Image (spheres, helix red, strand yellow):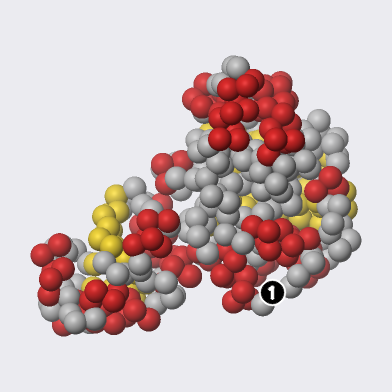
């Protein structure tokens, strides 16, 4: 039988369309347990590659014969060999092109909504890393919020839409992934905005993203109006778009809340986090649709693949928004932190402009799951 090659885009469609998929992951158990391709209806078997060097006969009874088996490894090589062995044994087998490396990098643009006067709002879903970026389009202009480092994806998408990128925003100085914001701005001539309280150590020029700033995008508005929202970082800032959507950065997620410790200041920032979640956000309209900068688990995806939910629903359902006792909240936030993101100190330095790793080094820095939330 022929061994098929799957792209990350094809796997992404299986996730978004809620389709079945059987994955044989041949990475080490620790790597698999830490981070894998997640799908609503995915089945998994994890057998390290080194256990299959003498053949695949022993695992054949554990594999389906009525559906294709997708073999996944770190960078592709091992999965090709295993898929070929499975094919020789009579199974329908495929491998993931580029392995988990390609899965970590893939972005799926999904339309969230139409905006006023013909505008559009898109969410770029990075399924392998849990990152969410946004593009607001109105008339012939576009703004980008929380872009990841794959600048060509955003620039080419804007070209396809026939719009000019005029503004690029980061809601905060990111620590779990490398931002593409200032690089997109440099390439397109757009204005790059960053909260000044997060920019004390940056070595490049930026425009201050300040409380009360309103930026016009065509006929739509991105409003940063009384939405300074510290807690994940001291400069974290939220956005209201078209009076319908609340972009919360890494402060509020669908199923959790942001962690305050990635600059080593959890005890200092936990009070800011509570103030944002329990005071600032509660003054906003509950019918605003929350659009975060990350998701943690596959269950946070809607049927169309977007990650979005009304603020009113989160005020009722999100555990992090329903801890009345302040001391209990402080304890929950500081005592239930997952491991910090891989290379988060170096990633912050990249996003400050202090170091400039090459592409392979950046890929290695970002490998692994999203860890921006309190568990």
- Say which quadrant the N terminus sits in: bottom left
Residue 135 lies, in percent from the top left, at: 66, 52
Residue 299 lies, in percent from the top left, at: 41, 42
Quarter of image, res 188: bottom right
| Image: 276 above or below 362 | above
Q: Tell me: 372 left or right of 375.
A: right
Q: How many discs mark residues in the rendered view?
A: 1
Depth order, front residue of 209/221: 209
Name, please, the residue furthest toward the top: 324
Depth order, front residue of 39/368: 368
Query: What residue is rendered at 34% in x and 79% in y?
Result: 78
Q: Is residue 153 visible?
A: no
Depth order, front residue of 202/310: 202
Q: Is residue 336 visible?
A: yes
The crowding category of the residue bearing disc 1, from other C-alpha atoms within 10 Å (few below 14, some 14 to 19, many at least 20), is few
Q: Which residue in the structure is indicated by mark 1?
A: 357
| Image: 316 above or below 262 | above
Query: What residue is rendered at 25% in x and 61% in y?
Result: 45
Quarter of image, res 141: bottom right
Q: Tell me: 368 left or right of 173.
A: left
Depth order, front residue of 12/34: 34
Q: Secondary structure at mark 1?
A: loop
Residue 262 lies, in percent from the top left, at: 67, 48
Query: What residue is rendered at 52% in x and 28% in y?
Result: 318
| Image: 183 above or below 270 | below
Q: Tell me: 32 left or right of 21.
A: right
Residue 274 lies, in percent from the top left, at: 68, 27
Query: What residue is rendered at 46% in x and 41% in y?
Result: 300
């Amino acid at each position: 039988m022929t061994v098929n090659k799957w792209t990350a885009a094809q796997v992404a469609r299986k996730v978004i369309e809620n389709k079945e998929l059987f994955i044989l992951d041949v990475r080490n158990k620790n790597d698999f347990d830490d981070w894998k391709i997640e799908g609503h209806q995915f089945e998994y078997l994890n057998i390290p590659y080194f256990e299959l060097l003498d053949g695949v006969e022993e695992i054949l009874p554990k594999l389906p014969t009525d559906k294709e088996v997708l073999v996944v490894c770190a960078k592709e090589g091992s999965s090709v060999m295993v898929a070929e062995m499975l094919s020789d044994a009579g199974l329908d087998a495929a491998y993931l092109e580029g392995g988990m490396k390609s899965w970590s990098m893939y972005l799926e643009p999904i339309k969230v909504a139409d905006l006023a006067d013909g505008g559009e709002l898109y969410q770029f879903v990075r399924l392998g890393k849990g990152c969410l970026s946004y593009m607001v389009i109105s008339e012939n202009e576009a703004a980008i919020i929380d872009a990841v480092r794959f600048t060509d994806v955003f620039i080419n998408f804007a070209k396809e839409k026939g719009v000019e990128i005029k503004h690029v925003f980061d809601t905060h100085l990111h620590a779990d992934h490398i931002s593409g914001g200032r690089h997109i701005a440099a390439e397109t001539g757009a204005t790059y905005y960053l909260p000044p309280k997060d920019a004390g150590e940056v070595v490049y020029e930026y425009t201050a993203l300040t409380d009360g700033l309103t930026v016009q995008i065509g006929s739509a508005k991105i409003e940063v109006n009384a939405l300074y929202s510290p807690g994940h970082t001291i400069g974290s800032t939220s956005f209201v778009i078209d009076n319908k959507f609340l972009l919360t950065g890494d402060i509020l997620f669908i199923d959790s809340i942001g962690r305050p410790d990635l600059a080593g200041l959890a005890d200092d920032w936990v009070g800011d986090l509570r103030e944002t979640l329990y005071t600032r956000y509660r003054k906003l309209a509950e019918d605003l649709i929350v659009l975060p900068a990350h998701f943690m688990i596959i269950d946070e995806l809607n049927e169309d693949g977007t990650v979005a939910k009304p603020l009113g629903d989160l005020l009722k359902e999100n555990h992090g928004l329903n801890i009345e006792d302040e001391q209990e909240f402080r304890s929950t936030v500081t005592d239930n932190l997952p491991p910090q993101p891989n290379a988060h100190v170096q990633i912050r330095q990249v996003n400050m402009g202090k170091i400039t790793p090459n592409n392979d080094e950046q890929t290695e820095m970002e490998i692994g799951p999203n860890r921006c939330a309190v568990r």
